[in-house]
Amino acid sequence: MSSRTVIRGGLVITASDEIHADVLIEDGRIAALAASGTTAATAFTAERVIDATGKYVIPGGVDAHTHMELPFGGTFASDTFETGTRAAAWGGTTTIVDFAVQSVGHTLREGLDTWHAKAEGNCAIDYAFHMIVSDVNDETLKEMDLLVEEGVTSFKQFMAYPGVFYSDDGQILRAMQRSAENGGLIMMHAENGIAIDVLVAQALARGETDPRYHGEVRKALLEAEATHRAIRLAQVAGAPLYVVHVSATEAVAELARARDEGLPVFGETCPQYLFLSTDNLAEPDFEGAKYVCSTPLRPKEHQAALWKGLRTNDLQVVSTDHCPFCFVGQKELGRGDFSKIPNGLPGVENRMDLLHQAVLDGHLTRRRWIEIACATPARMFGLYPKKGTIAPGADADVVIYDPHAEQVMSAATHHMNVDYSAYEGRRTTGRVETVLSRGVPVITEREYTGHAGHGVYTPRSTCQYLN
C-alpha cells in the first residue's frame, strides 16, 4: 500500500535554497518538489494534504550529540530513549546520534550492544550511535575497524575525567592513527583534565564549594590548550578531528588557526554556550547547579566569538550535548562539593527554536540555521542526503515551522524528563507545528501522534567532508 502526503504552500528552506514549493512525499521519502501554484505542483495528489501557508517547511533537525540514559557520577541521565526522542520530536529534531560507552576493561562491542538494547523499540525518531572509547588497546583498535564497517563511524575520546573516560596522549594518538586508516572520525572532549583535577582539589581545600567554582576551575585556557594538543596529535596521525562542545574564545581561535592551515579540523558548539553564561552558574541557593556542564559555561563575552565562528564556518555544527539530570535528587548530589554535581544540561527540545531566535536576532541567516542544525551534522556523520535536507530521495523527515508563533520556555510545558528548564522564562518567536518522521506524523498541529518504536537505528557512512 502506497502512502502519499502533500505539503502545500510553505517556504521550503534548506542549507542551500529558499523556495515557495509544494512537497510530495511517497512511502516515507521525498518524491518531488514543485514551485507552488505551478501545473506540476497542482498535479500532486495524496491522501493527506498539509497546508503550510505562511509557514516554513524545513528538514528535521539532526542532533549529533545526545546522552540518553548515560551513567555519570553515580546516577543516570534522566531522559530515557523513549522520553528523550519524544522531546526531540517536539523540538523539531528527527534524528539523534547518541553515544554508546565502552567501559574500561570491556570491549567496544559490549558497550555498543548495551546501547542498542537501551534504544531498540523505544525511540520516537531515528537514531544512530557514536562510540566512546575509554580503553585504548590492541583489541580496541581492531574493533574500531569493524565498527566503521557496520556504520558506527565516529569515536569519542576524553582529555578530561581522569579515572572515568580519560585517555592520555599516547592512547589518543593510537586511536587517531587507526581512524586515519579506517576512515573514522575522532571526536574530542578537549579539556586538560589532569590540570583541572589539581585546581578542583585546591578550590575545595579553600572551601570554595559552590557551583560557580565549577566554571572557575575548568579554565578557558585549559580548553584551548587541550584543543591545540588534540589538533597537533591529529596532525601527527594524519587524521581528521571534530572537537565537541567548544565554549571558549581561545578554543575557537585554535580551531580557526588549524583550518587556516588547511587541516581537516571541525568544531561544534551548543546552545548553552550561545545563550547562557557564568551568570547562571553563580545563581544563589545552589540554583547554579542546574547549569553545571563540561565544558563549562563561560562569561558572556565569549558568546561573540562563538557566533562569529558559526558565521565564518570555523564552527560548523550546533548540537545539544543533551544530558539531563533533575535538580532534585541528582544535581543536589553536589551540595557542599561542586565536583559531585552531575555534569550535563537538558536541551534536545530547545535547539531548533533557540537557533531560529538567533536568526531573528541577526546572528544567523535562515539557511545557515538549517545548515548548522540539519545539513552539516548529517554530512559530518555520514547521514546525508538521507537526513538533513528536503530533496527527492531523502527521508521525509520534515518540520512545518511557524516563524511567528511566540512561546515561553518552561519546565511546566517542555517534554524532557527533567524538573527544570535551562531557559526558564525565555521568550522566543518561532515554534514547531507538525513533524513528519519518514513521512509519518509524530507531532500533528502541536499534538503528539508518534509512538515508541517508530524510530529505527540508522547506520552511517564516513564523514562526507573527507571524501
Image (cartoon, rainbow, N blue to C red):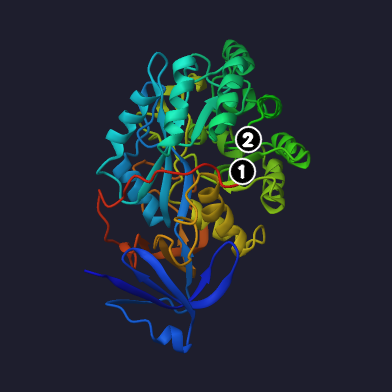
Q: CA distance from mark 1 to mark 2?
A: 8 Å
Q: Position of residue 193 (x, y in %)?
A: 59, 19
Residue pictured at 41% horizontal, 50% vertical: 95
- What is the secondary structure assignment of the residue under circle 2? loop
Vertically, is 387 above or below 272? below
Work out which quarter of the rendered image holds the N terminus and state it: bottom left
Q: Position of residue 320 (x, y in %)?
A: 50, 43
Q: Is residue 324 visible?
A: yes
Vertically, is 294 above or below 438? above
Q: Nearer the viewer, residue 449 or 148?
A: 148
Q: Amino acid at mark 2?
A: Pro
Q: Nearer the viewer, residue 129 or 217?
A: 129
Q: Residue furthest top?
A: 205
Which disc number belongs to residue 466? 1
Which disc number belongs to residue 245? none
Vertically, is 208 above or below 300? above
Q: Nearer the viewer, residue 429 or 334?
A: 429
Q: Quadrant of residue 243?
A: top right
Residue located beneath label 2 in the image: 240
Q: Amino acid at mark 1?
A: Leu
Contact between marks 1 and 2 (CB within 8 A): the answer is yes
